[in-house]
Amino acid sequence: MATKIRFMRLLRSGCFLAALLLRVLASAEQTPQPTAAFEINQIMRTHATAGDFSGAVLVAREGHVLYQHAFGYANLEWKIPNDLETKFEIGSMTKQFTALLALQLVHEGRIRLDGHVADYLPYYRNDTGKRITVKQLLDHTSGIPNFIAAPGFLEGPASRTHYSVRDFAEKYCSANLEFEPGTRFNYSNSGYFLLGAVLEQVSGQSYEQILRERIFTPLGMHGSGYTRTETIIPHRAAGYERSVSGLKNARFYDMSIPFAAGALYSTVGDLLLWDQALYSERLLPVELRDLLFKPNLDNYGFGWGIFIPPPGSPYAGETVLMHGGKIFGFQSVIERIPRYQELIVLLDNTDSPKLLDIAMEIRGVLSRNH
């Protein structure tokens, strides 16, 4: 009898332990694992705390926001925080909009990719204007020197002077060619300035009007536009430059100079609308749209860089479409991973040099969370 009682006790104890084990396992399964949003938030907070980021970030997959947040101040002097409606200057990310506008006019038969600058700008110097094609302006193989690289340009009075499009094109975008057009890649803001001049000449409208009517209004990008210092722009962030003594107010830069190469502002939400439009034919038929992302020399398309991450890095071997922007007091990065329809946007108003590193860390999170 005693043996039987001991056996029953052991049986009940075993059943209890088994039940307990099942509950523990079930609890472990229900314990939430770190999500992509959680991991990205950790990355962003770490960089913001370290002073590497002040701005807004958005990460999306298939058009759905995985993570968005703002850090730091839109105005340091008044301690006004950045938020998701804050408008940041995006610098050279402007080029992707200019490129798409050019292809729209190609689609309409008003511009030819093999057409020459002299065909569209009667005031441009004829000897080089007859040698440079629109395509070579788009893919940075024109040989026109980059006006920003001219010694002293950014530090001298030239960067603070207001110019008409024609005056600036003739004075700073008409230097002797550095190489035979089409033979080399050399990133040139001068080339994209000339594209803006061509757009205005052919359309009879200002670059700002063309952008608004053809891209921003149709896509509902109400937080985007052409930066003008004198205009009151609600929710505009102030720009700050880094120095050995800390942040300082950004230098003045007349926005007639970056023009079609770098004068736009936008928000992270608007850039998601832009990203999604590029998966459709809303703005261009597919055969022309895809030219934006077709690699030319140095893996540059039209307004977009085509990056193939190396072995050992997130999305190694995949195609990442990307571009950065830098203008006094601001830094920006956009990355698109077409295979997964993923988007990373980082807009910063302290000209942080860390944005590409941050974007790579976020790519790492995305690659682990499919």
Image (cartoon, rainbow, N blue to C red):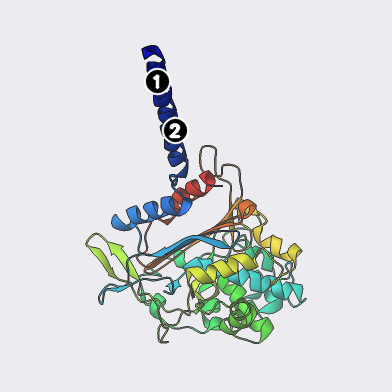
Given residues 276 and 300, the one toward you in this image is 276
Density class for disc 2 (Cα within 10 Å; few <14, some 14-19, many ≥20) is few
Number of numbered labels in the structure image:
2
Given residues 85 and 260, the one toward you in this image is 85
Q: Secondary structure at mark 1?
A: helix
Q: Is residue 125 above or below residue 304?
A: below
Where on the picture, by quarter, is residue 274? bottom right
The percent coordinates of residue 366 (x first, y second) are: 52, 49
The percent coordinates of residue 116 (x first, y second) are: 70, 71
Q: Residue at 63% across / 62% down in the picture? A: 302
Q: Amino acid at mark 2?
A: Ala
Residue 19, numbered circle: 2
Question: Dividing the image into 4 quarters, which one contains the N terminus?
Answer: top left
| Residue marked by disc 1 | 10
Is residue 167 among what the camera can see?
Answer: yes
- Determine whether, in the image, residue 351 is placed left or right of residue 78: right
Given residues 329 and 132, the one toward you in this image is 329
The percent coordinates of residue 69 (x first, y second) are: 41, 64
Is residue 123 among what the camera can see?
Answer: no
Q: Secondary structure at mark 2?
A: helix
Q: Is residue 291 above or below residue 297?
A: below
The single residue placed furthest to the front in the displayed view is: 1
Q: Residue at 59% across / 74% down in the picture? A: 194
- Determine whether, in the image, residue 334 is placed left or right of residue 151: right
Residue 147, numbered circle: none
Q: Amino acid at mark 1?
A: Leu
Viewer-nearest of labels 2 and 1? Answer: 1
Where on the picture, by quarter, is residue 131? bottom right
Q: Residue at 60% across / 42% down in the picture? A: 317
